[in-house]
Image (cartoon, grey):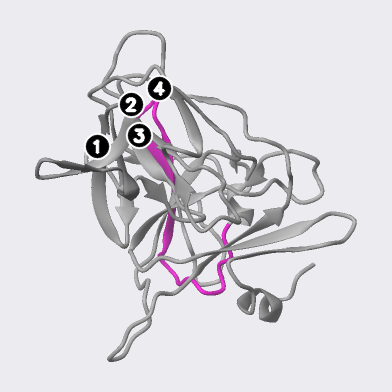
Amino acid sequence: MKKLMFAISLAGLLGLGASAAVQSANTFGVLKVESSTKQTIICVPWVAVGAGESPVAVEDLVMTSNLEEGDGLYLYDPSTKKYKAWFLTSSGTWDSPIMVDSVGATTGKSAGDTTAERGNALILVRQHPTTEGETPTAKPIYLYGQYTNSSVPAMTLSKGAWNLIAPPNMFSSVSDLNSNYTWENVDDSDTIRLQNNGIAITLVRHENQWAYKSGNNYITAAAKVQPGQGFWYVSKGTTDPRVTFSSTTNN
């Protein structure tokens, strides 16, 4: 199967920097994600508003006012190897969902009835991710919800499968996959696929670290995830124990 790759006013949102939180009975958060690519893997940095630590509904995660009709959200399930997909309507809402795989599509749960937990990832597909004109600029993506300082539990990945994951890094400039995370049970043939300055690259395992191979050189500095973004983890191992990873910092 072909993989896809990779109470706040609107005026206030558009003026925010990389990340911001507004104090009230609940702490509201907004994360600005910088991306110029049509397909962007986005993290789930927040929880549902006013619902304790409950996962956020898909329809409540991405601000739609700077998106356009036909833009899509995809949530991948490695156990079924299918995407749940929703597409933005002319009224700014996410339409009836479909399940997408290599064969075709069927109906699924609505974006309001589907939730995503912190540490999970979705793919946002935009038809026009940059402005028009002689010097196009990237259109930012805004993720919003309720802030929590709870740590994200260690994640166990599906073996022998593609896993779509995104550390909820909200405030650091980048998240280093070698120094900010602990990896266990990694197979030497496993890879990570992510965006590096708008270019899709593949990381390999080298001397117990993730690195980009260029010729005979292994560049560990490339193993970084931009704020608000995620990556594909491609597990090649098919036997237990399964791969786990956890953050060494509380983002």
Which label number is shown at residue 233?
A: 3
Pair 4/2: label in front? 2
Residue shown at 51%/58% (left/top)? 173
The residue beneath circle 1 is: 102
Q: Are marks 4 and 2 in contact (CB under 8 Å)?
A: no
Q: Is residue 171 visible?
A: yes
Pair 3/1: label in front? 3
Report x, y in % for residue 30: 65, 62
Q: Is residue 106 visible?
A: no
Q: Amino acid at mark 3?
A: Tyr
Position of 99 with respect to 93 (left or right) is left
**Marks 4 and 2, Cα distance to the nearest angstrom?**
20 Å
In terms of sequence position, does the residue under pointer 4 or pointer 1 come before the other?
Answer: 1
**Marks 3 and 1, Cα distance to the nearest angstrom?**
20 Å
**Marks 1 and 2, Cα distance to the nearest angstrom?**
34 Å
Q: Amino acid at mark 2?
A: Asn
* Residue range corresponding to the magenta coloring: 62-84
Report x, y in % for residue 71: 41, 64
Residue 66 colored magenta? yes
Q: Amino acid at mark 4?
A: Ser
Q: Residue furthest left?
A: 215
In terms of sequence position, does the residue under pointer 2 or pointer 3 come before the other?
Answer: 2
The residue beneath circle 4 is: 158
The 10 Å Cα crowd at callout 2, few under 14, some 14 to 19, many 20 or more, is few
**Marks 4 and 1, Cα distance to the nearest angstrom?**
19 Å
The residue beneath circle 2 is: 208
